[in-house]
Every structure is written in C-alpha cells, then in structure tokens.
C-alpha cells in the first residue's frame, strides 16, 4: 500500500520521540505503577478489537505478549479478546456500566453507523513495543490518515448532537495496549527495560481493520458489552477526504 500524506512518517517521528523519553525514564527507574485497573469506570466507545479483524495477526501479537510475559513476570496484561486499537470514546467515563440510558446509546449508535459504515477497511503496520507512563504498547503506523479523519468526524458529529466524547487535540497517534506496569520495584523495572529494548524493533506485520465494535467498556476492556459491530463497507480506506 502506498504511504500517503506523510501519515506513516509522522507516526515514525512520534514513536521515536516517545521511545527516547521512555529510555530516559527506564534508565532513571522513574516509571509509575498503574493503580487499580479492573474495573475502572465505563464509557460508550468505538474500538477495533484484534480478534474481529481478518488474518493471523492476532496470533503474532499473542506470541509477542507471551514472550513479554515470560520476561517481566507479574504485571497486568490485556486478555486476547480485549486487545484493540481505540477509535473514540463517545461519552465521559462514569462509575457504572448502567450509567448510560437506552435513548443515549441508540442516538450514539446511529451517529457511529452514519459516520463509520462507509469508511472502508484500513491497513496499519504494527512494529515494536513502546512505553508511555505505565503503559506498554505495540506501535501502530497508519498508511493513510483515515483513522485520524474518522476520529475527528465522529467527535464533531457527537458534539453537534450534544454528547461529550473523549477527544484529544492530536487525533493521529494509535497505540495497541499490551501491558500496564503494576509492579515498579527496581528489579521489575530492570526486567521491563531489558525486555522492551530487545522487543522495541520486533516486526509483527500489517493489520487490516474491517470491523469496529460499538460497546460499553471499562478502562481496559476487562468488562465490556458489544452493542453493535459496524462493518467498514467501502472498498478502500482512501474513500474519505484526507
């Protein structure tokens, strides 16, 4: 697939900068431990879960996760069915999964279907592990800007409809979260640092995203309920204006 609009190169620069900062933090042993994760607040959200996409990439990611688990011991790892890349949190995070009335769920569902269903499947390149804060993730490189465009379009549509989506100024970065550091004792951080340096350039492969899950979920998808599966039906990922 042709790299368009510098999306791939911008992701390279973004992840390189994060990695430089991560190495300084690892060298200093200055890594925060994640607090309580399961469950921690809920929101209505849109994500692309790895197991919902075609191909064997989920097996490769699972192999990488097992390699990391064997190296770092007792940390928090995402389960196979919760591994995902986030599109957009459609509501604020609230204490209970029952916090969202049915009329709100249906309104947001319609907006998501209208915004996403014609977008077309998208391809991303997955390579290497990174670290930000206590979060260990697989670096995701987009070939085109469609994911960022969809985040913006969906966020604007929800705001227009009176909702409060979880939006960020920079719509481009994509992380596939793999692990949260819950034990930041010196010995554990040394093990994490060694593993991340060995796996920072690990080649994983290309991911084709064809299905978006519309769901209610907690912070790390330890407890989630899929409300709809939205198929990206257009023939190619360049169907949106970039």
Image: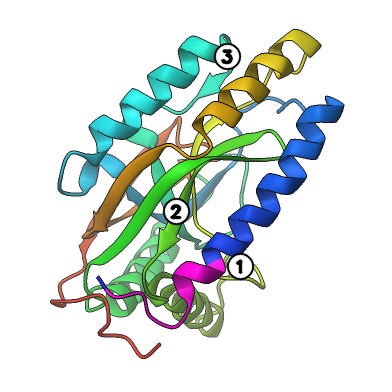
Q: Residue at x 26, y 58 (%)?
A: 209
Q: Position of residue 198 (x, y in %)?
A: 54, 27
> At 67% from the left edge and 73% from the top edge, which residue is drawn?
169
Tell me if mark 3 has few (under 14), some (14-19) or many (20+) residues whose alpha carbon lies within 10 angstroms of its own.
many
Instruction: Note whether residue 39 is visible.
Output: no
| Mark 2 residue element | strand
The mark that comes first in sequence, 1 or 2, is 2
Compute the Cα span from label 3 to label 1.
Answer: 32 Å
Q: Where is residue 57? Give x, y as percent.
A: 24, 40
Q: Quadrant of the C terminus?
A: bottom left
Nearer the observer: mark 3 or 1; the answer is: 3
| Residue 235 is at least partly visible in this image | yes
For disc 2, the marked residue is 140
69 and 96: which is toward the camera: 69
Front tag of 1 and 2: 2
Q: Mark 2 Cα within 10 Å, few/some/many (few <14, many 20+)?
A: many
Q: Determine whether the residue tagged by mark 3 lies in a helix, strand or loop.
A: helix
Residue receiving disc 3: 72
**Residue ID at (50%, 31%):** 199
Q: Which residues are magenta?
A: 2-10
Q: Is residue 81 above or below residue 90?
A: above
Q: Earlier in the sequence, mark 3 or mark 2?
A: 3
Q: Which residue is mark 1?
A: 167
The image position of residue 7, as x and y in percent, is 47, 73
Residue nearest the viewer, comparing 124 with 152: 124
Give the number of marks.
3
Q: Is residue 43 magenta?
A: no
> Which residue appears at 38% of the width and 80% of the height?
4
């Amino acid at each position: 697939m042709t790299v368009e609009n510098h999306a791939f190169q911008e992701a390279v620069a973004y992840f390189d900068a994060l990695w430089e900062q991560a190495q300084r933090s690892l060298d200093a042993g200055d890594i925060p431990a994640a607090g309580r994760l399961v469950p921690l607040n809920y929101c209505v959200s849109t994500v692309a879960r790895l197991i919902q996409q075609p191909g064997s990439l989920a097996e490769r990611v699972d192999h990488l996760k097992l390699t990391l688990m064997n190296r770092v011991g007792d940390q928090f790892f995402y389960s196979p069915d919760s591994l995902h890349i986030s599109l957009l949190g459609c509501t604020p995070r609230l204490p209970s999964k029952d916090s969202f009335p049915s009329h709100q769920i249906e309104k947001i569902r319609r907006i998501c279907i209208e915004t996403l269903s014609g977008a077309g499947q998208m391809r991303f390149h997955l390579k290497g592990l990174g670290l930000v804060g206590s979060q260990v993730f697989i670096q995701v490189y987009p070939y085109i800007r469609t994911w960022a465009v969809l985040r913006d379009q969906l966020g604007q549509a929800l705001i227009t409809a009176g909702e409060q989506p979880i939006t960020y100024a920079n719509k481009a970065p994509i992380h596939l979260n793999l692990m949260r550091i819950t034990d930041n004792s010196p010995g554990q951080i040394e093990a994490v640092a060694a593993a991340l340096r060995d796996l920072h350039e690990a080649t994983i492969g290309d991911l084709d995203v064809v299905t978006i899950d519309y769901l209610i979920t907690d912070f790390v998808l330890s407890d989630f309920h899929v409300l709809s599966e939205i198929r990206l039906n257009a023939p190619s990922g360049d169907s949106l204006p970039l």
